[in-house]
Structures are given as structure tokens and as C-alpha cells.
Amino acid sequence: MKLIRFGEVGQERAGMILRGGALIDASIFGEDYDEKFFDSDGMRRLRRWAATFASAQPKLRVPARLGPPIARPSKIVCIGLNYRDHARETGMALPDEPVIFMKASSATAGPYDDLVMPRNASKVDWEIELGVVIGKRASQVAEGRAMDYVAGYLVVNDFSERSYQLERGGQWCKGKSADGFAPMGPYFVTPDEIPNAHDLKLWLAVNGKTMQKSSTANMIFGIPKIISYVSHFMTLLPGDVISTGTPSGVGMARKPARYLRPGDVVESGIEGLGRQRQEIQPWQQRFTTKPKPSV
Ligand code: ZN
């Protein structure tokens, strides 16, 4: 199954893609693709519902905005330096165990949303990554059982502001968490449609020029190891996303370094999971905190 969410930011509704490729409105199913949905065997209920009712649902009027295909997760856990070539290009040592860091879940965005640069950003960079969505509560999971916890897969671009990440002290999450820094989608794909998640081509281009091109076969730590490993440090909740690391070709490692500027267009994709496109916009204040009116 391929699931989508569509509508304005924060107002997304559930949808899906039929076998023939039509995008349909599945909001009458009555649930969002969130923690509660995954935790209550929602995928099975949705599959059953879809078999009878999906083809009769209204098709989406194009162009509809696509949101992230799952609701905002409780957390986004990222794996650093998980491709040999990428570890090498950053000049960092190959990790003995997975490097993990957090990305704020408020960074989640739709696959075609513009990327607004963070304030005073100067080193915005790209990282195409395979995102794994957790299907059930995972704590102290053995590697041999880890794939049972996968609800599905989606494309993630782990956008990064390198000056915040590497020059401001403290943890990487500073440079990983700006609004829009985690576009997801265009769709969420269940494992039955992805025969081998460890053999998917992934790529990214800036203004039409290929910057990253690799395969998930080149990951240092595979998905079972990653899920098991992370689950020993924290409980993964249904709907959580693990972004599994990026191959070589990031802007930071190019000679000279190439960072994103307003007007640049970033396109990326993963075999079987669709493609994304973001246009880079200059910083602007989008969300303001208004004082509550006094009563
Ligand atoms: Zn990354």
C-alpha cells in the first residue's frame, strides 16, 4: 500500500494511491496516520477498508499539496555516518557502533514544500536518506526480530545547517531541526511492496546536477541492527521515524563546498519510494507568537 496525506500545512487528511496510480481521498476512513493508528493495528484495518471502499473514493484534484505521508512522529532518530563513502568524505572515522542523533519532529514537511532557510543560515546542506517508520512499540528488540517492527518506508531529506551543526558547540540537533528540515514522502510504502530495503538506489540532484548517487546496499549498519540498537537506548513508538544515514556527495564535502542558496532546486528520490523536490527560499518569519487577547 502507498499512503499519502494531503491538504494545507497542519490540516492534512489521509489519502492513498491506488494500484493504477490514482490519488484518492481516504479521509472517510476516519483516521490519520499517526501513533494511535499504527498502535491499534491501523494498517490492517485500513487494508481491509481499502479492499472494499478505496476505489469508490473521490480522486484528488491536482495540484493538491502533499504533506508528509505520516502524521508528525513523536521523534525522528537519525543515524550519522552510516555509509562508508560519506564517513570518509567528512574526514570522520568509521563508527564502531551506530552514531545516533535527534532531529526535532517539528522539522517535518511535505515532499514538495519550499525549504525556507533558517535565520542567518549560511551552510544549508542536503542528505538523501531512507526513512524507516516504526509500526509498534519497540524496546530492547533483538536484531532477529527487528524487521517485525517496520511499518514501512519513505524518503527523507535530512537537511542540515552545517554552521549550526558543527561550529556552534554542543549537539548536532541544532543544525538538523529547523522548520522544513525533514521533508518526507511523497508517499509511505508498506514493506510488502519493497522486497529488499537494503538494495534501493537513492539519488539527489541540485539544479539538475547529480550530487548523490548510491544504494542502501552501501549502509554500514543495516535496518535490523539500527532498530535493535536504538531500541536499547529509548523506546521507539509507533509512527516514529528512523532516518538511516546518507551516502557521499553532500555539499559540505565538495571542493569547494557547495551550500544551498535561495532559488536552488533540490530533487531527490529512492527506488520504489518516489521523489521529492524543494525550492530554496530566503529566511522569513513564518510563525509568530501572538499574545493572547486579554479577557
Ligand atoms: Zn543524515
Image (cartoon, grey):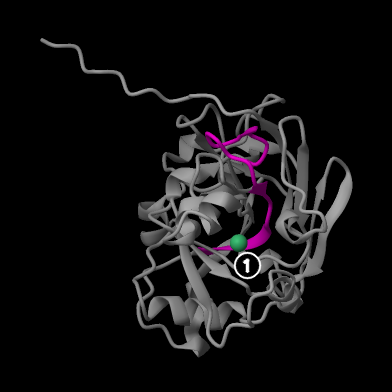
| Closer to the camera in the image, 161 or 100 | 161
User: Is 199 left, or right, of 34 in this rendering?
Assistant: right
Image quadrant in which the C terminus is located = top left
Which quarter of the frame holds ligand 1? bottom right
Q: Which residues are magenta?
A: 111-133
User: Is 20 left, or right, of 159 in this rendering?
Assistant: right
Q: Quadrant of residue 246?
A: bottom right
- The residue tagged with tag 1: helix, strand or loop? loop
Spot occupied by residue 169 in the image (x, y as percentages of width and height): 45, 59
Furthest-right residue in this view: 209
> Which residue is located at x 88 percent, y 43 percent?
208
User: Is 52 left, or right, of 268 in this rendering?
Assistant: left
> Which residue is located at x 19 percent, y 12 percent?
293
| Closer to the camera in the image, 17 or 248 | 248
CB of mark 1 near ligand 1 (< 8 Å): yes
Spot occupied by residue 215 in the image (x, y as percentages of width and height): 78, 70
As displayed, is residue 69 above or below residue 272? Answer: above
Give yes or no for residue 115 being in the magenta stretch.
yes
Q: Quadrant of residue 272?
A: bottom right
Give yes or no for residue 86 being in the magenta stretch.
no
> Which residue is located at x 54 percent, y 59 percent?
166
Image quadrant in which the N terminus is located = bottom right
Q: Amino acid at mark 1?
A: Gly
Spot occupied by residue 146 in the image (x, y as percentages of width and height): 50, 81
Callout 1 crowding tier (Cα within 10 Å): few <14, some 14–19, many ≥20: many
As displayed, is residue 129 above or below residue 79? Answer: above
As displayed, is residue 88 above or below residue 39? Answer: below
Q: Which residue is mark 1?
A: 245
Spot occupied by residue 266 in the image (x, y as percentages of width and height): 76, 43
Tell me if I can see residue 138 in this picture: yes
